[in-house]
Image (spheres, grey):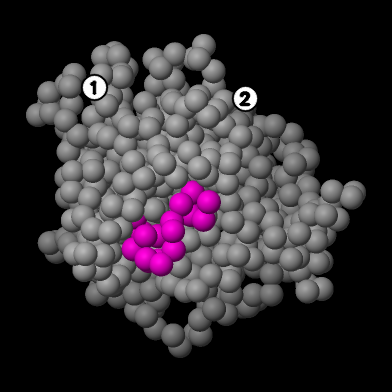
Amino acid sequence: MKKYLIAGFRKALGLHRPGRSMVIREDDIFLVSFPKSGNTWTRFLLANLLHPEQIATFANIHLLIPDPTGTSKRDLDGMAAPRIIKSHECFDPRYGRVIYIVRDPRDVAVSQYHYHRKLMKIDDDSPIETFVTRFLAGKTCPHGSWGQNIVTWLSTSEGSPNFLLLRYEDMLADTVRELTKIAAFAGIAATPQQIAQAVERSSAARMRKLEETQTDQCDLTKGSRKDLSFVRSAGAGGWRSELPASMVESIEAAWGPLMQHLGYELSSHLPSKARNYESLGILSAR
Amino acid sequence: MLAQIKYAVKYALGRDHAGRNFTVYPDDTFLVSYPKSGNTWVRFLLANLLFPDEEVGFANINRLLPAPGVSSKRYLKKLPRPRILKSHEPFDVRFKKVIYLVRDPRDVVVSEYHFNLKKRYIDSTVSLEQFVSKFVSGETAGYGSWWEHAAGWIAARNGNPRFLLVRYEDLITDSIAETGRIAEFLNLPAGAERLRIAVERSSADRMRKLEKQQADSWTGTRNTRQDIPFVRTAKSGGWKEALPLQSAEEIEIAWAPLLNFLGYELLTRQADNIVMPAWIRNS
């Protein structure tokens, strides 16, 4: 009872993290992705672009690019418009403008596996096969499976002028070009110099350095293992050496056509049991 | 500050409205639809199947087949499990077992127009044509557009054994068979006689009669215009008379692939010219 009263007062005073019950404004922009798809990096890029006077860190990121599950209602309500808000949610019609980042699910699986080791959700000797099986079933996080999360967004929003679809791999290959796209979409006036500075300030090397001293100041890493880092490879294609062939096959069998639709080449040529998502883009012709 | 204290106490006692923030259990079943798609009718059908000894009506439907939007968290928590809950939510990943009820959006919009008049959300200066344009852009109901609702649920779940797609139109044409299909999905014991009685007790005529007596005892009809009924035509295809051709066309242009997939005949476009998204074709 006491616990509930305290929670009730925190709520009444706006000190709680509102999560899904956040009050959404019409001009909010949402930065959405399945977990482990480059969302934090993009938050840093945007924060450094929007706030050149204040370098983005793991300690202040929740106040610069807020997260309804990591920022208090009071802080969220106090932010100037337009807010750019981080989210991992499946499709939500209240989100007016959405930047959606996808990443190769084979890399996402590897990344999430290591992240869960860091968070001590799984033991080091827990085989990656077990993890991938749960990953495919959407049981490793509360945001659906990788395919489900993406298909709810693509089927409803792809092709809309209020929906910007980006690939993590393209962001790695040409960060300046992709951040310029994001800035244009979000209506941020930015010179090439400002873009370059934001990219530089958000490099993997710099983020790793910040992480070293701020692990416990950030919700993403608080109380986690210090011997494993949150900013890990920050690369693409790591799955080729880390993921057992049978797991690659399982992922491709589950989501092959959707992966191809997003431009991810398949390594196996197994007949896919999945539904064919190839021409999802046609939905957007509406 | 007093308001804050009141809220804190309400919250602590679980008396605040659950809305979207209620605990979902893995064995819950959700009856989901876009608004004005026959959800209340199916609630009556299910309540009559589940509680043959109760007189199901508007006055007790929120208790018998609860909706998190209007029930308190405390009430939802006390319900015996497995629970069956009503919802209009667009895709929600927490809902694992779902009966998804879909209705021809050309009928939905006509129904929603009258419902909005009844609720005084709009007055008669808003024409049906104007309303259709707002409907197409998803501005009328608070749950996204009809397309976003149906596409989100169907793309993510159709084909899953824990997802049952039901068309309002089939429910109208063969109420007993479709109710039987729903009962089977829910593992409810429902012989022919029990189904027949549930359908009869949930007929439009009976619901109209109950509405007359109980309009003030239900959240859906309380403080609304009494000259417009909640249970209106309870038919399919009414749009062919009610909807101006150009409004029907507006909907068909916007949503042809999904209309086609759901078997809703197009009036203004050739079905063979529509390129179907592959997730629809194979689902």
Name the spot of residue B66 as percent of width and height, x first.
Answer: 50, 58
Q: As drawn, is A48 to the left or to the right of B10?
A: left
Which residues, given as a range, are shown in magenta? B45-61
Three-letter amino acid code of the residue under disc 1: Lys
As displayed, is residue A153 above or below residue A137? above
Q: Residue at x 53, y 40 (%)?
A: B215
As displayed, is residue B122 above or below residue B264? above
Q: Secondary structure at mark 2?
A: loop
Q: CA distance from mark 2 to mark 1?
A: 49 Å
Which mark is drawn over residue A63?
none
Q: Nearer the viewer, residue B105 or B80?
A: B80
> In this view of the protein, can residue B177 be seen by the observer?
yes
User: Is residue B58 highlighted in magenta?
Assistant: yes
Q: Residue at x 60, y 65 (%)?
A: B75
Q: As drawn, is A267 to the left or to the right of B147?
A: left
Task: Give the residue pinned by disc 1.
Answer: B240
Name the spot of residue A110 as percent of width and height, x first.
Answer: 42, 68
Three-letter amino acid code of the residue under disc 2: Ala
As displayed, is residue A141 above or below residue A285? below
Name the spot of residue B104 as percent of width and height, x first.
Answer: 28, 35
Q: Residue at x 28, y 52 (%)?
A: B200
Q: As drawn, is A280 to the left or to the right of A140?
A: left
